[in-house]
Image: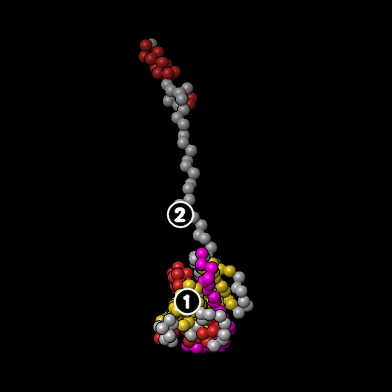
Amino acid sequence: MRSMLAMIVLLTGCTCGPQGGGTPVPHEAPAAHQETPSEAPAQPEFEDAAGGLAWRAEEPLISRRPSSPMRAAEYAVRDHEGAELTVFHFGRDQGGGVDENVARWVDQFEQPDGRPSREVAVIERAEVNGIRVTRVQVAGAFAGMRGMGGGGGAAQPGYRLLGAIAEGPDGMVFFKLTGPEAAVQDASGAFESLIASLHPSG
């Protein structure tokens, strides 16, 4: 009898769950999934294209509407009002040869010691993703068309040019970054990245 009473007391006194009258142990809600940087959706990449080639521009180059129908693309340099990158494409077998255009760009500059700018210009030829590219850089007083006998105002000292001519399947594409030396220096990394991104479009 005593053993039966003890068993009843044990059964009625049990608090091992909700049915036993005990306090239920709260269950933690599963933590909300937080998106890690690697899982974040990739930002879309925008490309410009001309002459059968495409490329990407990054800061501080800022795309803007071309100021002339002759320009395939145009970029300002953030925080540098006097600098710009212009892109030209005239069509297949149009716009002159590579050397002719390089000479034209270089002749737009004057040197303080009177030397021809062709003596100080740096010209390099390479391939970028299978595309032949001729690079040119020169600094000095920027005379623009006046430097080629085209008239115009006084030359602007302290300017620099970074240029590239890419030979695309549908004609050459001309990239020309000009402006005060500090502005061109700030944009030089973005210019290098743009040229490195060149690839056939389509």
**Residue in the foreground of this view, choosing between 63 and 54:** 63
Specify the farthest residue to the top.
1
Asked if the residue at tag 1 contacts the one at tag 2, i.e. Cβ–Cβ closer than 8 Å, the answer is no
**Disc 1 target residue:** 157
Q: Tell me the CA gap for discs 2 and 1.
A: 46 Å
Q: Can you say whether 20 is above or below 2 in the image?
A: below
Image vertical order of residue 3 relative to residue 70, above or below: above
Residue kind at label 2, given as amino acid type: Pro
* Residue lying at the far left of the rendered structure: 3
Residue at left offset 48%, top offset 85%: 107
Task: Judge left or right: residue 70 versus residue 138.
Answer: right
Q: Residues within 10 Å of mark 1 (few under 14, many from 20)?
A: some
Q: Quick one: label 2 or label 1, which is nearer the N terminus?
A: 2
Q: Where residue 175 appears, x then y in whole percent?
A: 51, 77
| Residue located beneath label 2 in the image | 37
What span is in magenta?
79-101
